[in-house]
Amino acid sequence: MKKILLSTALSFAAPMAFADVNASEVLTNYANIAEAKYQDSLITAQALQTAVDALIADPSEGNLQAAKAAWFAARVPYQQTEVYRFGNAIVDDWEGKVNAWPLDEGLIDYVDASYGGPSDENEFAALNVIANPSFTLSGEEIDAYEITPAFLEGQLHEADGVEANVATGYHAIEFLLWGQDLNGHGTGAGNRAWTDYASGEDCTNGNCDRRADYLKAATDLLVSDLEWMTAQWGVEGDARVEVLADETAGLSAMLTGMGSLSYGEVAGERMRLGVMLNDPEEEHSCFADNTHNDHYYDGLGVQNVYLGSYTRIDGSVVSGASLAELVAETNGELDVEMRTKLSATMRELGDIKHAAEAGFAYDQMLEAGNAAGEDLVMGGVNAFIDQTRSIERIVGALAVGDVAIEGSDSLDDPDAVFQ
């Protein structure tokens, strides 16, 4: 992904002295919010773990739906953490284990015949490890008889160095709960039967015991990964220590995360690209049709970092000194501009969310010729781009040095998308 380097005229100057708001306090609150978000992500992942264990112990339609509901709930706090990517290397280096997308789901389990098979880009696109307790990888025979967290993380994830071989995280679990969405631009999400986890003669599509092993291993790994990241933002955690070590670098990390998530990642790779390709597979949560919420809570994550306030899953609020206050002290009009842009983005994302919840699913919005859908998606794209322009101005106003904002061919070089 391309990066846009923003060099400010004041980047050579000493860090600014903030009169009424201490930059250290802003960064401490930023770390406190990160810790709270990852704690909530962990709590909801543990609830998902409990629901998955119940499904495996007693397969039924009710238990499958309960596991799906727990997965939906787990996405709400996690998506709000994505604003901590890009600027914080500890998060960026780790994120691919938990939220990698898109994935070649045929690596994991059975797929429809229309999915195809191995390709020049990915020899393991249709491996179906659930049905194959051994396979050859780079000339080495791999024992996959026991599907464990260590196996998924150490041997299967990004097998053969291919990023699409996503074996872990939320979207692998999503596929195991929903199955493929074979509706194209039509109504409906994936429709995996609970009997895919049944025993004996009730088992459908074979290997139900191994499918259950995979689902449990992936969910257990997600929980342990979130435990690790939560600790990184604790009082002595490496992520907290690093962001507090240098005020200018810490503020740069905040703005890098806000700008890169807004522009290259969500506006570009997750939204604009889908409109260009008219491809329902470009949904971020393409099995569960939850993409409208993914985008909404990503946008909310950017907003609550700027405002220095996060509402936890229990309704309590973590808040304190904010980036907004720093900006207001330097340029009150710019703070009003940024707040206005953030509110506009949330309105646009809210329109997408409300339309999807009313039955106009995100994959339907991506259909070629669907003007109403394109208007909704592009409303979000344009709002994210617009707020990024204000983030760029804040970089200059606060003189935090060079900030590299992630770009996207879909926004910066559209012709390259089709080459």
Image (cartoon, rainbow, N blue to C red):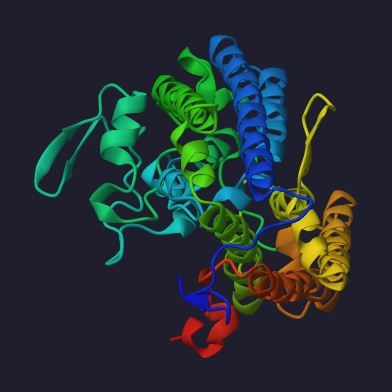
374 lies above or below 198: below
Which quarter of the rendered picture does the N terminus lie within? Answer: bottom left
Which quarter of the rendered picture does the C terminus lie within? Answer: bottom left
Picture coordinates of residue 341, whole percent (x, y) = 83, 68
Query: In which quadrant of the rendered view does residue 348 lie?
Result: bottom right
The answer to whether residue 221 is visible is yes
Picture coordinates of residue 366, whole percent (x, y) = 71, 69
Q: Residue at x 80, y 55 (%)?
A: 325
97 lies above or below 283: above
Picture coordinates of residue 230, whole percent (x, y) = 54, 29
Q: Residue furthest bottom?
A: 415
The answer to whether residue 181 is visible is no
Q: Nearer the viewer, residue 65 or 207?
A: 65
From the viewer's perspective, is 415 left or right of 183? Answer: left
Q: Nearer the viewer, residue 236 or 368?
A: 236
From the viewer's perspective, is 141 left or right of 149? Answer: left
Q: Nearer the viewer, residue 11 or 287?
A: 11
Q: Residue at x 58, y 65 (%)?
A: 260
157 lies above or below 49: below
Q: Nearer the viewer, residue 404 or 151?
A: 404
Query: In which quadrant of the rendered view does residue 368 lie?
Result: bottom right
339 lies above or below 73: below
Picture coordinates of residue 392, whole percent (x, y) = 66, 74
Q: Residue at x 46, y 57 (%)?
A: 115
From the viewer's perspective, is 337 left or right of 79? Answer: right
From the viewer's perspective, is 245 left or right of 254? Answer: left
Q: Residue furthest top?
A: 57
